[in-house]
Image (tube, rainbow, N blue to C red):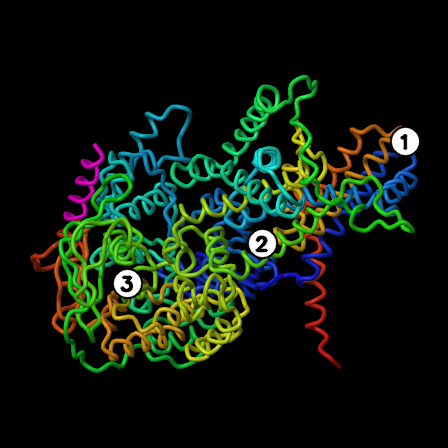
Amino acid sequence: MDRMPAWADAVLVPLISLLLAALLSALVILGIGENPIEALKLMVEGALLRSAGWGYTLYYATNFIFTGLAVSVAFHAKLFNIGGEGQAMIGGLGVALVCLYLPWPHWSLALVAASVAAALFGAVWAFIPAYLQAKRGSHIVITTIMFNFIAAALLNYLLVNVMKPEGQQDPATAIFPAATHLPTFQDMFATEAMPLFRGSPGNVTFFLAIAACLVVWALIWRTRLGYEIRALGHSESAARYAGISPVRTIVIAMLISGALAGLMGVNTAMGEAERLVMNATEGAGFIGIAVALMGRNHPIGVFLAAILFGFLYQGGAELALWTNIPRELIVVIQALVILFTGALDNMVRMPLERVFAARRRAARKTPAE
Amino acid sequence: MTDTAPAIELKGISKSFGPVQANKDISIRVMPGTIHGIIGENGAGKSTLMSILYGFYSADAGEIWVKGEKTVIPDSQAAIRAGIGMVFQHFKLVQNFTVLENVILGAEDGGLLKPSLSKARGVLKQLAEEYELSVDPDTQVQHLSVGHQQRVEILKALYRQADILILDEPTGVLTPAEADHLFRILDNLRAEGKTIILITHKLREIMEITDTVSVMRRGEMTATVKTAETSPEELAELMVGRKVLLRVDKAPAKPKEALLEIENLRHLDGQGVEKLRNISLEVRAGEIVGLAGVAGNGQSELLNVLGGYADATGTVRVNGREIPLSGRGCDGMARRAAGIGHVPEDRQREGLIMPYSAWENTVFGYHHGPETGSGLLMDNAAIRKEAAAKMERFDVRPPDPSLAAKNFSGGNQQKIVLAREIERNPDVLLIGQPTRGVDIGAIEFIHEQIVRLRDMGKAILLVSVELDEIFALSDRIAVMFDGRIMGVRDAGETDQRELGLLMAGITEDPGGDAYEAVDAAMDQKDHREAARHG
């Protein structure tokens, strides 16, 4: 029988893990002679209390939603896609090609085309590792990691040697035409009286990410394909018995995963930088793994975890700006969160299970008097 | 017998795993020089009890007394020192070691192997003569037949001077003649004063060989009786807790046209070894053909090929139409569309997705059908509703479609698979090990369903390693050995002895005791196997 009520599994476990991570982070901050309460206040203020802070938090969260969903979809088929980083880079390349080399009358059309291109490019980048895994048994973890490096090298070459406008110093493409610039939250919600989201990069892509959550939810739990992906993830022998082709299902799951990671390129290239720059992904592909882990591979969980990590990113940047806490410490705090919510999951889960089992036993022994 | 101390005495042994109590206050006395049977259904706690005795688990409460002395057995080394030897259901042998090397493994004297090996060779020779336990000491274990591997396990225990031997389900993998031979070995051991604990779920074996039998049910010891003073019916009732019918009621078959025709079927495994050699077989509408044989003689491969997930050459026709045996159109879903239902041998690895809910499992393999929804989406509400009705009709307990498959008992898991496959009304039904790991209560029900399907005019191919089950259900019986069908007999015109010989690949009855002939046949198979691998 299931050991814990569903709400405890979905809410209580990550919450306690998070508290533990926060506690340990506080000790670390104390250790370098800063005040952890002040630091937390600063993070919350910088990331959540001002609308511009939200603009940043949601911008980062958009990236993490895409990469988190990418990891989740693959994980339902028991595939560990560590290549979100590379797939997102190549997705950005697709966006850049669409925006730079095709004329667009309006951003909405450009957004549709750029999204298709980003998804397609990301999927193509995931296809080769997927095919090698399905047909030849080359481990997907190894191949996707290698493809991250290949993607970085390819982008490096293209930006330095091909796509960089003449005379420009930094390795990046030209600015995309104005018609392809996506509306930011500021464009959408700020009024004369209420200058919301000023200067922050959050943009319309966030809603695309929410749509992606809905689509992934329907895909995994409502379609025949999702049923097959999960079945294969649980038991390959049973999938074979049922007539589900492991090769086909692995490839399709990875194509979807790669497409989702690729979509992140829309946010970074089109939504924020408005050109393609080197290292636009900033490790979001890897954060996606933590987001998926913490979100239990469920779109709602991924969404919430992505917001949390967006907060950590933005709050961390604020800390580095206003205190003597070095940027590296922010990485430490993020790592602690990942460690507790992902790797040390059982440390919290097992005692909790015991508590619930004991409570159930007690309830059984004292029936309603 | 009352004045001698028991060889083993367990007092008040309890053991739980989390919320599951596997053993509840179990006390048992095993007298020296006897064969003591422990019988019970799967999950009754037999194996747990023996694992405690052998030092794999430690009991939460209770005492172990060996030969009149209170003993603590923290690990298997201590059990061996106390003179206890164990023959596991799944052998613990190093496949690429010779028999001799396996025997001395862990019991070497000193750093050099040579003296141990020559000592063991002598001991083995002596044991072989004493107990009819002959195995070639220089053959690698991987080339031995299962029966011979089991002998190596017994030899290992005897070499370590065990005088109390525990055998866990020892006949599950043996032909009837091999089982008879094993029982003769056990008889010899008893005559020499050794004590034997035999764990089994087969009533026939208990009646045949034991002196005393203890019955376990749901972690408790429900009775200990003298075998001579009990009957199979009484034991079955003690095991299940209610009266059970031990045979299947069925009318004679009225077979019609052939629905499943198999001709010259060949299949190679991943290593290129031929696992099916020119199989031809026919199953007609309205009959059950039982496929008997010791596990590992090609029955599983035949089911996989017919089920669409292993390639083969040859011809298979279903309802007169040929079906592809490799490439496109050869998969489980295509087979189902062609009219083949398949209850696989291993429901946990193949038949069910264990974390899936019962309702999700009721469409597994049929999930592309129109009744599961239209277009890309599945109509979960409709599937759930249909699943609830199916579970009701097949008496699945608890009748909760949302419960995950892993939370049902073995028998109820099997009923979910049966409900799924039978309710699609297939022309041909393949059933592998329909009652493996299924409680006796559910066995009755499952057998009834299979016979009911036959009477509806379907063709049923039944694979089972339980010869009793084959006899109870089949109208015709085919026997497989080493990838071949050795013969097909009408169920009414054959007997255990004939089938037992066919299961060892012997088509001519040698007369008299068949042990030697079977043993020779198995030796031959060992050598063929060794030669095949160079």
Element on which disc 1 rests? loop
Q: Which residues are magenta?
A: B520-534
Residue bearing mark 3: B464
Q: B241 and A40: which one is in front?
A: A40
Residue bearing mark 1: A323
Q: Quarter of the image containing the C terminus of chain B?
A: top left
Residue bearing mark 2: A216
Element on which disc 3 rests? loop
User: Which three-letter amino acid code belongs to the residue tagged 3?
Assistant: Ser
Q: Is residue B526 magenta?
A: yes
* Label 1: chain letter: A
Location of residue B190 with respect to A33 vertically, above or below: below
Q: Quarter of the image containing the N terminus of chain B?
A: bottom left
Element on which disc 2 rests? helix
- Residue B255 drawn at (x, y percent): 16, 76
Residue A169, located in which quarter of the rendered image? top right
Residues at marks 3 and 1, common chain? Answer: no
Q: Is residue A147 magenta?
A: no
Q: Are marks 3 and 1 in contact (CB under 8 Å)?
A: no
- Residue B136 drawn at (x, y percent): 22, 38
Residue B156 in view of the camera: yes
Q: Residue at x 50, y 44 (%)?
A: A255
Q: Nearer the viewer, mark 3 or mark 1?
A: 1
